[in-house]
Image (cartoon, coloured by chain):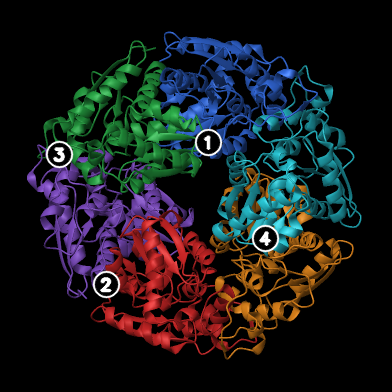
Chain colours: A cyan, B orange, C red, D purple, E green, F blue
Amino acid sequence: MNRRPRILLINPNTTPGFTQRIQHIAAEYAAAGTIVEAVNPQQGPRAIESIYDELLSAPATLELVLQHAPHVDAFVIACYSDHPVIYAAREITTKPVVGIAEATMHMACMLGHKFSVVTTNRQWEPLLWDAVHHYGLAARCASVRSTGLPVLALEEKSEAETYALIHNIAQRAVEQDGADVICLGCAGMSGMDKRLTADLSAPVLDGVICALKFLEGMVHYGISTSKRLAYAKPEPKTLDNLPTIFATAYGNKAR
Amino acid sequence: MNRRPRILLINPNTTPGFTQRIQHIAAEYAAAGTIVEAVNPQQGPRAIESIYDELLSAPATLELVLQHAPHVDAFVIACYSDHPVIYAAREITTKPVVGIAEATMHMACMLGHKFSVVTTNRQWEPLLWDAVHHYGLAARCASVRSTGLPVLALEEKSEAETYALIHNIAQRAVEQDGADVICLGCAGMSGMDKRLTADLSAPVLDGVICALKFLEGMVHYGISTSKRLAYAKPEPKTLDNLPTIFATAYGNKAR
Amino acid sequence: MNRRPRILLINPNTTPGFTQRIQHIAAEYAAAGTIVEAVNPQQGPRAIESIYDELLSAPATLELVLQHAPHVDAFVIACYSDHPVIYAAREITTKPVVGIAEATMHMACMLGHKFSVVTTNRQWEPLLWDAVHHYGLAARCASVRSTGLPVLALEEKSEAETYALIHNIAQRAVEQDGADVICLGCAGMSGMDKRLTADLSAPVLDGVICALKFLEGMVHYGISTSKRLAYAKPEPKTLDNLPTIFATAYGNKAR
Amino acid sequence: MNRRPRILLINPNTTPGFTQRIQHIAAEYAAAGTIVEAVNPQQGPRAIESIYDELLSAPATLELVLQHAPHVDAFVIACYSDHPVIYAAREITTKPVVGIAEATMHMACMLGHKFSVVTTNRQWEPLLWDAVHHYGLAARCASVRSTGLPVLALEEKSEAETYALIHNIAQRAVEQDGADVICLGCAGMSGMDKRLTADLSAPVLDGVICALKFLEGMVHYGISTSKRLAYAKPEPKTLDNLPTIFATAYGNKAR
Amino acid sequence: MNRRPRILLINPNTTPGFTQRIQHIAAEYAAAGTIVEAVNPQQGPRAIESIYDELLSAPATLELVLQHAPHVDAFVIACYSDHPVIYAAREITTKPVVGIAEATMHMACMLGHKFSVVTTNRQWEPLLWDAVHHYGLAARCASVRSTGLPVLALEEKSEAETYALIHNIAQRAVEQDGADVICLGCAGMSGMDKRLTADLSAPVLDGVICALKFLEGMVHYGISTSKRLAYAKPEPKTLDNLPTIFATAYGNKAR
Amino acid sequence: MNRRPRILLINPNTTPGFTQRIQHIAAEYAAAGTIVEAVNPQQGPRAIESIYDELLSAPATLELVLQHAPHVDAFVIACYSDHPVIYAAREITTKPVVGIAEATMHMACMLGHKFSVVTTNRQWEPLLWDAVHHYGLAARCASVRSTGLPVLALEEKSEAETYALIHNIAQRAVEQDGADVICLGCAGMSGMDKRLTADLSAPVLDGVICALKFLEGMVHYGISTSKRLAYAKPEPKTLDNLPTIFATAYGNKAR
């Protein structure tokens, strides 16, 4: 049994400040023996708020997966969305990969009857409902509620204003929608979980911590992504005009 | 942050041999710092294979929850079913409670696209489908397959025969039903997970280990059952002709 | 064809006043030839408002089932919930068993397009939604609405206040949620159905009456619970430290 | 309380032999005090096996509803389908209306965990699945299986052959699909329910009897179709070139 | 490839003014080469607002289908509902048949994430939700909202009042329910699509145009209704007291 | 009304032979007045068979969307999958965008009761089921069946062998799964639709043609992607180390 997991947190956007923040949070909550490291790609958008942004962030993020796969035991994809990189990473490595959105939702299911997700701008509502449906958890989701402000606008407000805004939305989810648990649906909300938990008298979950704890558990147990069907290694094929590292994902049966 | 969780495993049937087995498994997989202990009630059925059996096991199991709640950090309910004691325990304590069936299913969702449950006699099939639906995970479940033998009959067979039977059923789940991950749906299958994983080339999950790792994560993170709505403490009321410990669950607002 | 059904109503809480009330209602609506009797256990909670309460009421209620099974034709489980005793009773007898919650909902489906359930305290909302899902009737349920008061608090109010409260909630279900039919989701509301039906211009259903009429129909027709798969008699097993009557449920193939 | 229900069975096809058969069955199972009568339209198809057939049978069947509504207490629509006349009849009368397909399915839900429908030609499979979905009962339906023969071909076979064919299909539903209860999905199967129940050791339901018992219960209880929303009386309007009786359905607010 | 489709629009109500209106709209949007014609039956209701109305309109509408089938390439059923004539027409012809409600909804699914339907009186809400479920599109439907006025009352208002009413309801669907696209759920709203699209900054769809474009595409492609299973020609049978044209639908294998 | 649509078909893989094939098919089925052009990116995988492949194809494909958006009226994304580029393209242009998988499925829903998808290797089964669920069409899908061979292996077989293999799988979908319509789930199957339709007596749909006809209809009608909520233009942000064209998608409100 492996009790010394090396866990890589990949922030798929290019903002180093966010990468440092999640590294800090993960270090604080890591179990004895766990080594955590956070990285971000050099190429792509500074924030991810659309499928377009996700796709622009994907190649450089996958490059990080391929580079680090031989040296780490598990991957956190630290973007609160159903980022397609999660599934591509499962296809191309044998190590477990957990996204921070799914981590909060599975955790919430074991702490309450229904959860709500609190997110930033309104466009995230359909995207996160799609995520909830994709995870098969629609029956457990009370609501997806947004603050109505984009991520970067949120960053521009004072901490007190931001906190008040998020607290207000989370409270409605609990009181009007019947949520037992709140999932913080944006990296910009990281670090507010404990205070909100106390103020709302309901568990409020940070995705980085949830994903970290799940991956520690998987590595301790010695289990990993199934390569049997859905996440089998992709069929080898020629890649045109892409860095050679991408071809290493396929193995050696090139066609 | 609490890095020294005391986790109580409650086997709701009265067979001490099974209690010892889960204690042994949990001890093997516990993180550094975790203290695990397994107990079982003195009153109730020797095995649980029906809702009738569940209900007969319930009062003495809840008594264990009430007795141990002040001294432990988390509870595993070690019966592969949607045992109603899981929910009652969430109502009457503030500590996290995880059942071994839900634990395997949530773990499976982060390792594959679909999971199957392998269980014992055929009557478990509707019961475990109900569990899957109750957890809201029907869209992720490829199949519930049974060996056709009751738990105790399974125990009477040689280990090789039992293994062959379970391997055969699990293989069909993978090859015919498209399961990426197998959940071992019976305590009698405990200890076969690693060998089956190797033979099937697909993750095969033991519920006690999954629940243990989830609870360690919750205690490390400092999160617990939401008492906000679904699992709020029940309204106080008079209990007729029951041991006085049961009244302690309600708090002091007696009516 | 049996046109003289003996139907036993089991109130699983220990409050004799409620038992008398349902006996009275059933007697009023019983068909010519039907014999109704209502009983309650001597052990357990005075009211049932949580899964914990359900489980404390279960053994003594099942004892009643086992005692009466040879002498009656059918059982009503008179608790407005998805009480697990309904299923255990189906496992251990060959007589039909109907719960009062499912009875109102199936009846409502033949009288309108959508139904709503009106219940007491808010914690019943998730419990009754779970019931609706378990019955497979979620697509027919417009809403579950609660008065926000616990059962026993409701009893303390004047009849006029209680009526006004329930009428108000039911009206919202009809006008805002699109309910065609209202299911009275608490025993404390028994006897209000006719007046509410008149005041709301919509059918309002009492569970005891619905269950009684369904069971009369089943006994007239000569049909009963299927023992084929889900409700087959449980496998025999040793019971530790329980009254001997519980062992009679398993039949003679003791292991 | 009305203990003398007058229940009209409407066979929407034009075959008097079938009308007599259902009259006979209903008379056999009617409660003391119930008056049953069966009728069929003079215009329309001899059998109903498609939506086209349903629509050709509709006007004359609705005419029967309008003619009899003042004199009867309840209507059975005796066609094993989701015949749209059921809903139109609910719109234009205040008396309860039950179809024989929905009657078997709601009855089955209180007798087992899953039901299957056994029908005639294969085209009925999608039609009856649509019915199951429309009733909101898909989660309770194990399968819809057909004999592969149209109704009238079935009538041409010897009774022994027909029985063997239906028994065989029903047995597969029980053994392979996990059905606890069988719904006989064609009038041509009427009268086989008791023998099949015995041979399969599982309840096998006749729709005419189920609908009769439900309607007796509704009339005893004094409840009827909700006129509140979905089945409100249609807005009055001019009808061109149709018998004047059809205009009586709208009431006097003609536009 | 057939680039000269002859498309018949059938208005199932008997109001010629509406027939002219849809003829006009279809002519405006028809592709080069397409011939459109609109007809209505001489027998039936002047407006369709209930299942009763649908059934009274059915025989004469099906007669139109049978009369025109040899001479046209495709049928629009121009009633905003899940009119059963759509399915009967698919059974009895080999030409494609599209209803205007399903046309708007499938179109909407390719233009946005969620659609809402705006309809007339409140009784249409359950009917159109049933339609949405029948099409299998419930997950894509944000809401069905009604103006609360019956079709004919709507016609009596000034155009400005009607527009304001519909605009108001559609705006709520977009702003409160999260609809990306609006489906105009009533013929009386025809011709308002372009103005609403501009005022709401969201696509607003007219069913006649959507159905026309889909059928042009089908005829161009050379594809038509599957006669393989669900819409196979009905089994031949005797029809009593109906015009002889109805028997031609069955083919020559009369029984 | 625009009757001269310029429709761009984007093949997201880098194999020019496939691009030529779809150009040829589209030209054959285009309406009078429609101008079709097919292109493919110069960077990315030669075939797309996994989420990894999708993500590697995304940036260069989106570059094509941005380059061509000012000059064309509509986009076909010609990859039989729920390729995330479909959604990103909807976010960054105002022109309608249709994927070939969704096109076949919506078309199938208007031609039959259930459809099946026939695809290549088995790993596509979970991916295409996910697509079906994402489109909200699970209730209409009879099955997703695969030939078990990867795309490129399929290309290496003789045409007769390939045809026989696909015919065989499609036949099982019709006969065993109850599919009325078959969707050809791979570009390598293009051109077989007419022959399969004849051999199976059931419509068999090519995605390029279906998407083309839908887009022609949208352009004729003058409707396009809703920019209201889900596909609103993404918030502007800095892009690091990416070609400048990608920044043009955001408009000028850079943060």
Q: Nearer the viewer, residue C21 or D40?
A: C21
Quarter of the view holding residue B254: bottom right
Res B65 visible: yes
Instruction: Point out the frontmost of discs 1 and 4.
Output: 1
**Helix, strand or loop at disc 4?**
loop
Subunit ID for the residue under disc 3 = E
**Same chain, marks 4 and 2?**
no
Question: Could you give the CA–CA distance between mark 4 and mark 2, rounded to whole angstroms?
Answer: 43 Å
State the residue position of label 4: A110
Q: Amino acid at mark 4?
A: Met
State the residue position of label 3: E239
Quarter of the view holding residue F82: top right
Q: Nearer the viewer, residue C150 or F255?
A: F255
Residue occupying image coordinates x 73% and y 44% = A157
Q: Earlier in the sequence, mark 1 or mark 3?
A: 1
Q: Amino acid at mark 2?
A: Tyr
User: Which labelled disc corresponds to residue D221?
Assistant: 2
Question: How many residues crowd around disc 3 within 10 Å: few (fewer than 14), some, or many (20 or more)?
Answer: many
State the residue position of label 1: E113
